[in-house]
Image: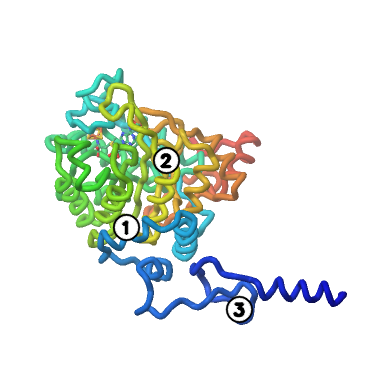
Amino acid sequence: MSRLVARKATRKVSSVRFYSIVHDVPRVAGSLSQSPPPPAPESQSVFEQAVYATGARNSWTKEEISQIHQKPLMELAYAASTVHRRFHKPSAVQLCTLMNIKTGGCTEDCSYCAQSSRYKTNLQTTKLSTVDSVIEAAKIAKANGSNRFCMGAAWRDMRGRTRGLKNIVEMVKGVRGLGMEACVTLGMLDKQQARELKEAGLTAYNHNIDTSREHYPNVITTRSYDERLQTLENVREAGIHVCSGGILGLGETPATDHVGLIHTLATLPEHPESFPVNKLVPIKGTPMFGQDAVKLEDMVRCIATARLVMPKTIIRIAAGRVSMPESEQMLCFMAGANAIFTGEKMLTTDCNGWEQDKDMFERWGLTPMQTEASKLVEVQAEPKFGASSFAHLKEAEKAGEKAIEA
Ligand code: SAM
Ligand code: DTB
Ligand code: SF4
């Protein structure tokens, strides 16, 4: 090597700079990529505390979450990605398939919802689906790599719905019997109803708080924020996993209301096991129709902040994913999201479709998440192959294999 080249090489090495305080596992001593050691715990900023966390904490103040939320987006997303890797397998994305088991005719005034009877949304209302049709749909979901099945009903609450609950108990048992996680979202739930669902084997209950406490009255007036929190408490007490999140794009102010949404959930005695981030799907006829579309930067900022303050929680890109190009979805995954809803439909609107998601997973090396909860019951109908990768599923499909024994 000439002296000039050697000098240039030396200069290059000595000019290595570190632009971020973020690092994860300890590096080999002397390695060029070695990051500076973490600051001593007592001198760490809130952001650094979140970045170096080894467990979940629920003592966050709104001010602290706001400090994290305000970080330059690139730094925030990188930090969230780092924490994501410490707490989760980065390529694993949970697939949950939704089924609307009772469409429309709901008495509530949620100003975004196609299923409220107060708005003219041209929706055909239905009765509760039969148990058999639900199990058939769950089998299809499982054959497509989904290991969680979520059943939604357009109800305010479960009061006086004894027969409905009995049927839903059978649906839950049937879904669990397939070796899938079962989730339901039925509106408000009391303690006894929660216990019955737990006994049936329910894995998780979805009940969103939707937005911050301050913005909530601008969105819904027929049930309060505290009633929502009471349902979450009832679910938690029964030993069911809590799935609770929000909707972005309801005319809120991200800097305060997204922080408020995250703060409410991150300061519960236990963090929700999953946090769905819905991007408003504008429904013609509802009061929220015509709101400005959610900006990608607000979505990524919200996901990354949630990842940092609720590091163990599964964060789901929920409604509105169908309007996001693949590149936007990938930014969300890189900022800490690790779950999606899959299938042809959400509740009343379109989902991305099996094939589109399989292709995206293949392109980016994502794999369907396998969770412990789906292994808790004895599997009655074992599929012919495990859904460990979409590539695997696609090959099997091509070979004309049937996913599930009749
Ligand atoms: N009726 C039950 C309830 O309200 O809890 C369960 C079904 S409800 C449709 C489930 C959640 O879907 C809502 O809490 C809301 O967060 C979300 N959602 C409903 N319509 C939406 C829309 N148009 N855009 C985005 N998210 C929506
Ligand atoms: C959640 O947070 N989002 C899902 C699920 N939980 C039930 C519902 C999204 C609904 C999107 C609008 C629609 O299809 O009507
Ligand atoms: Fe009813 Fe749920 Fe829609 Fe509100 S979000 S109107 S409670 S179905």
Among numbered discs 2 and 3, the one appearing first in the sequence: 3
Q: Residues within 10 Å of mark 1 (few under 14, many from 20)?
A: some
- In the visual, does 259 lie left or right of 359? left
Q: Note whether 374 is above or below 283 in the view shown.
A: below
Query: Residue 110: image x %, image y %?
Result: 22, 33
Q: Nearer the viewer, residue 55 or 97?
A: 55
Among numbered discs 1 and 2, the one appearing first in the sequence: 1
Q: Splitting the image into 4 quarters, where does residue 271 fall?
A: bottom left
Q: Residues within 10 Å of mark 3 (few under 14, many from 20)?
A: few
**Residue on which the image places disc 1:** 66
Q: Is residue 392 visible?
A: no
Q: Nearer the viewer, residue 137 or 377?
A: 137
Of discs 2 and 3, which sits in the foreground? 2
Quadrant of picture, ligand 2 = top left
- In the visual, does 109 lie left or right of 151? left
**Residue on which the image places disc 2:** 295
Among numbered discs 1 and 3, the one appearing first in the sequence: 3
Query: Residue 148: image x %, image y %?
Result: 40, 45
Q: Residue at x 64, y 71 (%)?
A: 16
Disc 1 marks which amino acid? Ser
Disc 2 marks which amino acid? Lys
**Residue on which the image places disc 3:** 28
Q: Secondary structure at mark 1?
A: helix
Rendering colour mode: rainbow
